[in-house]
Amino acid sequence: MSNFQDIPDSDLESAVREAYGDQDLVEDVGFFNFVCPYCGTISENPMAKIKRKAYVYTNTWMFICYKCLREHHVMVDFKESYPEIYKRLIFQKYGHHGQKKQPSYKKVYINGAYNFKDGELVPLDDLYDADAIRAADFCRKRNIRQDVYSRWFVCKRGKQFLDRNPDGSVKLNKLGFPIGNEYGNRLIIPYYRFGGTWIQFDARSLDPNNTLRYRNYTGAKRELYNGDFIHFDRQFYILEGSIDSTFIKNSVAIGGLQHFMSFVNENPDILKYKKNCTILFDADDPGISDLRKVMKLGFNWFDWSKLINDNKDSASYGKPVKDVNDAVLNCSSIKMTSDGCIDPEFISGRTYSSEAGIMMLNLKYGAPKKR
């Protein structure tokens, strides 16, 4: 436990707010900033300029003060200065010793993006809503962990959620279709930001006959799924879909190859730590040319197509699995950890360097065509 990696990020977030909340705590993308409790003081003069010196960085959970030069894991600071918080974090995770649990992860969304109406959005941990129960059952059948889908929502379908004119009539678009409730009967998968808010989301249809399985919200800037919580300085993984990434710890989802380079440009640590990265894109034919471009940047690659669906109850029995969730559901050779994630050793044992990956792509799909 010396590296404290088993403590959930959400618990550490809550603990940082509790410990340093009265030290003029400020939250930003990737870190907390506050007045150092060792070398800083908060002036009683309200006009005095506040000098924040200490940081807790959320990719490593290191406490750093650039004035008194303290640098250690925030748990070390909790142990020295906030022993009750330290004890609670060590023991509360499994609910032992009667310790009080940290506040649960806040399910909040930012107003001003997609404007869900009152009652339209229901959390999946609502045990009394039929739509939430049905959506949670959908997640369980896909082996998605409860601690993951309990942070998601279902968007209810109903005429009461349509946009209306002042006279009460339903608003119509240029094609004559009603406006509003576009995500009705869909599982809403938020792209949580550090602190619990979200704008971007995926909307997965709960109708098995719907040919448009996913609808991404286009009214907000495209983001990495789980992007605020990734540790680039450790082994990390990049996938296409948000659901797939829930099965692999320390992973992000990009929502498709077309978004890859924009994320690389916005997040220089992706290239800086590319040797720590393994790409796990879907095992299908589309996008092979783009995938080669990704491989040429020096990322490692996992070929899911080598794993065969051996679930006789599956319609795709005997065929290569097409993505991570398909592999989890239908491939007996895949190794999982006790907490419902894919074993990282299973991934590393089947991961190829960028050079070997390109050769395999050429053997399977042929050399890239000259343009």
Image (spheres, helix red, strand yellow):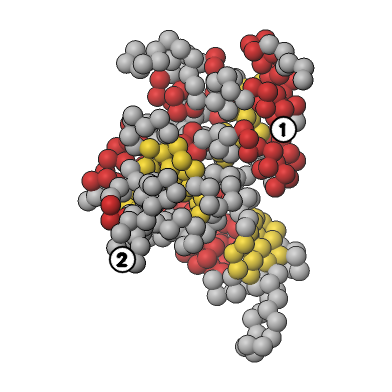
366, 251: nearer the viewer: 366
Which quarter of the figure is the C terminus placed in? Answer: top right
User: Looking at the image, can residue 102 be seen?
Assistant: no
Which residue appears at 28% of the width and 52% of the height?
159
Residue receiving disc 2: 167
Q: Is residue 130 left or right of residue 368?
A: left
248, 252: nearer the viewer: 252
Query: Could you say which quadrant of the image residue 134 lies in?
Result: top left
Which residue appears at 62% of the width and 62% of the height?
28
Disc 2 and disc 1: Cα gap in Å?
60 Å
Q: Position of residue 23 (x, y in %)?
A: 59, 74
Residue receiving disc 1: 275
Seen in the picture, residue 278 relative to 202 is either above or below; the reply is above
Which residue appears at 49% of the width and 43% of the height?
216
Q: Position of residue 334 (x, y in %)?
A: 47, 21
Which quarter of the figure is the N terminus placed in? Answer: top right
Q: Position of residue 211 (x, y in %)?
A: 40, 30
Q: Secondary structure at mark 2?
A: loop
